[in-house]
Image (spheres, rainbow, N blue to C red):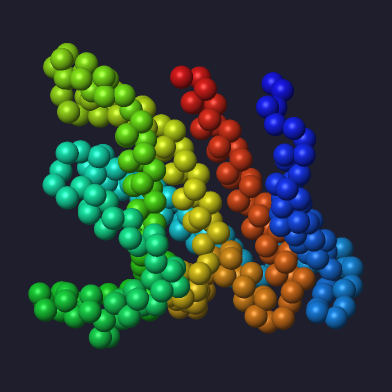
Amino acid sequence: MKSPYPTWFFIPAGVFYLVLFLVPTIASFYFSLTRWTLFSVEFIGFDNFVRFFQEPQLVQGFINTFIYAFLTSGAKVVLGLLLGVFLSSQIIARGFLRSVVFFPVLVSVIGVGILFKVLMDPFDGPINEGLAAIGIDGPGWYTDPSLALVSVAIVDIWAGVGLATLIYIAGMVAIPQEYFEASKVDGASAWSTFRHITLPLLRPATVTVVLLSLIGGLRRFDLIWTMTGGGPGFSSDVLASVVYKQYQAGFFGLSTAGNVVLFVVVAAIIFPLSWWLNRKEDER
């Protein structure tokens, strides 16, 4: 189909894309093959990738990355759907309640991490003190190696479910009311209406939430680093935090190679998943 716009109309966006996206991406691939500092660059081929895959904490980082991404993504889809349906109904103070759910999305992730690190303090944090008041010994939320990653994931879900809810609310609003009225005339139950009308017609919103939350989960670093620093030990290390530790140690080429690996991992999961989900949508 012929574009309705002349060629010059696309030039500013093309320059923006070239300078801010294409050039940095190509530069990252190049620097991943070098040993570089601010003053020198030495081409060393694939040595950085060989060293990166020999990192002792890499396997744990991969496992934690996948656990974290799929746990947070799944929870955001389910909770976002339930909250979206609830906040689209005719309830009192609906606008206020929507604002409350969306508010954490507007807060800095670093601020959220610092706040919950205080709240979840295993010794004198308000959450454990509240549990102690009713006779329950609070766990070491981020000091217990078996619980640290899950604790950060819970905070991530709380902070991000507002965006998923907003997407589902937009999807709910787009469903023609005639479908619900016809369902009511036919005597369909609430569950039947949800299962056969709401859920299928919310599929585009679900695809969007799945892809966005999965990409965010696979790349998550800031919240994990703020709350646990990848610890205790390597128990909450993810791929992004492994890369950051190499930057801290001054291995810039090695960490750039890690970023390229992270990019490939995200792309290898998201592109096939997006194709499969959209193909299912086209077949409907």
In the figure, 18 relative to 126: above or below? above
Residue 150 appears anywhere in the view: no
In the figure, 202 relative to 141: above or below? above
Q: Quadrant of the N terminus?
A: top right
Q: Relative to residue 209, is residue 17 drawn left or right? A: right
Q: Relative to residue 163, is residue 98 drawn left or right? A: left
Of all residues shown, which one is farthest toward the top?
A: 186
Query: Quarter of the image holding residue 38?
Result: bottom right
Residue 245 appears anywhere in the view: yes
In the figure, 181 relative to 162: above or below? above
Residue nearest the observer in this picture, 1 or 135: 1
Residue nearest the observer in this picture, 38 or 100: 100
Tell me what residue is drawn at x 33 percent, y 41 percent: 169
Tell me what residue is drawn at x 22 percent, y 53 percent: 97
Tell me what residue is drawn at x 50 percent, y 44 percent: 211
Query: Quarter of the image holding residue 3?
Result: top right
Picture coordinates of residue 82, whole percent (x, y): 27, 43
Total residue callouts: 0
Residue nearest the observer in this picture, 118 or 172: 172
Picture coordinates of residue 106, whole percent (x, y): 40, 62
Picture coordinates of residue 266, whole percent (x, y): 60, 51
